[in-house]
Image (cartoon, rainbow, N blue to C red):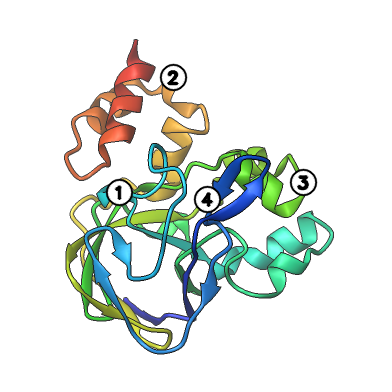
């Protein structure tokens, strides 16, 4: 599986709402940038308690979903260009049901691994000016996913993303999101136990699986 990268985006933390700051407003750039343990050079996160870090180094959001969002929200100016969801990587041809926890990809020249899905927060609703957007992400599973960086490299729009390894083919991002975020986990304790022990799943989502088992 090899597909082109439509856009690579980064953003700086800036005032967002009251005293709150955010780097959700990410813009595409031309040329290549370095990719390291904490993400793409020039990218920032405002609240490091819940954003960023090695397990959330790079956010990938499918451009495939933009048409659905435009229809659902009655059109929105943010949906006319990539970056509406604060993503770093925009592509067509990969969605949550077609990628898995632990997948390793060559992203440009870097090597990355899917660590978890993206759980939305209030900032996404504030960005769109529609408070229900985060809840809609939860009910539909259209959240995208995060990568951890295994090998440093560079990435640019027009580069390829290529699947190299899929060790956990039954654990799609869509399935794991519905179990841990969408509420399905209470009906599948066996799956939660498997997720709690899954080394390739981000530590905070393993902890969430354990909590849901209580």
Q: Earlier in the sequence, mark 3 or mark 4?
A: 3
Q: Secondary structure at mark 1?
A: loop
Q: Measure the C-alpha gap from mark 2 to mark 1.
A: 28 Å
Residue nearest the observer in this picture, 122 or 185: 122
Estimate the x, y position of residue 116 in percent, counting from the top left.
Answer: 35, 46
Estimate the x, y position of residue 210 in percent, counting from the top left.
Answer: 29, 20
State if disc 1 and disc 4 touch (CB < 8 Å).
Answer: no
Instruction: Give the residue number, with chain letter if any, for mark 3.
Output: 130
Instruction: Give the residue number, with chain letter if any, for mark 1.
Output: 53
Residue 49 drawn above or below residue 79? above
Q: Measure the C-alpha gap from mark 2 to mark 3.
A: 29 Å
Q: Earlier in the sequence, mark 4 or mark 1?
A: 1
Q: Which mark is residue 186?
A: 2
Q: Secondary structure at mark 2?
A: helix
Q: Nearer the viewer, mark 2 or mark 1?
A: 1
Q: Nearer the viewer, mark 4 or mark 1?
A: 1
> Quarter-wise, where is residue 34 in the image?
bottom left
């Amino acid at each position: 599986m090899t597909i082109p990268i439509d856009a690579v985006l980064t953003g700086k933390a800036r005032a967002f709402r009251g005293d709150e700051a955010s780097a959700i407003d990410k813009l595409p750039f031309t040329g290549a940038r370095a990719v390291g343990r904490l993400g793409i050079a020039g990218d920032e996160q405002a609240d490091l308690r819940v954003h960023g870090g090695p397990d959330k180094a790079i956010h990938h959001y499918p451009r495939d979903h933009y048409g659905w969002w435009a229809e659902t929200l009655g059109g929105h100016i943010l949906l006319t260009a990539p970056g509406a969801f604060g993503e770093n990587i925009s592509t067509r041809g990969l969605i949550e049901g077609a990628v898995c926890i632990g997948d390793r990809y060559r992203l440009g020249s870097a090597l990355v691994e899917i660590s978890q899905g993206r759980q939305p927060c209030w900032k996404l609703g504030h960005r769109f000016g529609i408070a229900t957007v985060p809840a809609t992400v939860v009910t539909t599973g259209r959240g995208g996913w995060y990568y951890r960086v295994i090998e440093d490299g560079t990435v640019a729009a027009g580069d390829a993303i290529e699947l190299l390894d899929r060790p956990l083919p039954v654990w799609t991002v869509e399935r794991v999101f519905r179990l841990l975020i969408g509420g399905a986990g209470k009906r599948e304790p066996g799956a939660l136990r498997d997720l709690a022990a899954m080394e390739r799943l981000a530590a905070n989502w393993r902890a969430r699986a354990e909590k849901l088992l209580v």
